[in-house]
Amino acid sequence: MATIFQVPITSSFPCSSSSSSSSRRSHKQHALNRTLCSVGSAKIPMPPINPKDPFLSKLASVAATSPELLLNRPKNSDMPPYLDIYDSPKLMATPATVERSVSYNEHRPRRPPPDLPSLLLHGRIVYIGMPLVPAVTELVVAELMYLQWMDPKEPIFLYINSTGTTRDDGETVGMETEGFAIYDAMMQLKNEIHTVAVGAAIGQACLLLAAGTKGKRFMMPHAKAMIQQPRAPSSGLMPASDVFIRAKEVIINRDTLVQLLAKHTENSVETVADVMKRPFYMDSTRAKEFGVIDRILWRGQEQIMADVAAPEDWDKGAGIRAVDAV
């Protein structure tokens, strides 16, 4: 870098009378004298400086104001070249550090992408795709409250593919209060909640499906819904009195589930309690008849419904003239 600030050696600058005896001096000392002589009579030529480079900018400033600092360099210095002109010199990071810290692809994201639930949440979609265990309940309730805080007027879309508080083999994995917690959160929201069954809605998950806004409860054509009695968790080596307490709590949860299902399906409590004596499976058509859902979603139905003529057009085409009531 030192060669940037050297001046081409010419014979047009006489320095002193001693220059006539140049044959007695070495060529290197002669060139140095000419360079030092030219400092006082002419400015050091400056190459183009990148203004965004602080090192070269500082170096150019020192060369313009105090060129002797660059020409009279110490011979045996432990400091790397030209770093002593800075107040607090700092060495550049090693190449390995630069490789890890600098991104050379301008299209590469500057931060990690968000997780899938966050992307769905941006579209006001809450997806329940696991049994109702405490971790799932915590996430779903938090998402519902967040969406209401974001906009209490826009609808929330709740997609359900869950076996409730049990696994598909019937083993209990969560308490019935997990489903009741999500249900209570839904009932407290000001937003419309559109529920959609995808795959399966069993037990408490079926209650969440039926608890959607009336007229906004949907089911995929091949999804399944099923209601059943709550199951008591394994008692193991519990005392008989504790087993009795647990069984009593399960009966209370069953009665609560029956009442809530009767309320949202518009069936009597006796009807719901009767079908729940054994597991009651429903396909999309039977779930609609039972009152769990309002519509079945299938591909292309929106366009078909849009092409259906209005009732007045049907009457007109059939030659029926409506008479206004007196």
Image: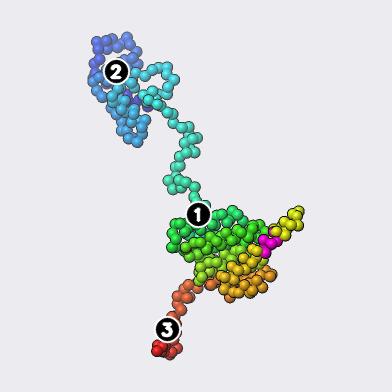
- Please indicate, yes or no, whether residue 33 appears anywhere in the rendered image: yes
State the image coordinates of residue 188 (x, y, percent, origin top left): 51, 61
Separation of residues labelled 3 and 1 (CA atoms): 46 Å
Q: Say which mark, if any, is on residue 312.
A: 3
Q: x and y percent of residue 130 in the render?
A: 60, 58
SS at mark 3 in the image = helix
- Residue located at (28% from left, 24% from top): 65
Badge 2 crowding class, 10 Å Cα cut-off, few under 14, some 14 to 19, many 20 or more, is: some
Residue range in magenta is: 246-251
Evaluate if marks 3 and 2 touch, with contact meaning CB atoms under 8 Å apart. Answer: no
Residue at 45 percent of width and 39 percent of height = 102
Closer to us: mark 3 or mark 2? 3
User: What amino acid does circle 2 point to?
Assistant: Leu
Q: Earlier in the sequence, mark 3 or mark 2?
A: 2
Q: Amino acid at mark 3?
A: Glu
Using the image, tell me which numbered label, if any, was put on residue 118: 1
**Can residue 199 be seen?**
no
Q: CA distance from mark 3 to mark 2?
A: 105 Å
Q: Is residue 67 above or below residue 119?
A: above
Image quarter hosting the C terminus: bottom left
Q: Residue at x 24, y 16 (%)?
A: 14
Question: Callout 2: helix, strand or loop?
Answer: helix
| Residue linked to disc 2 | 36
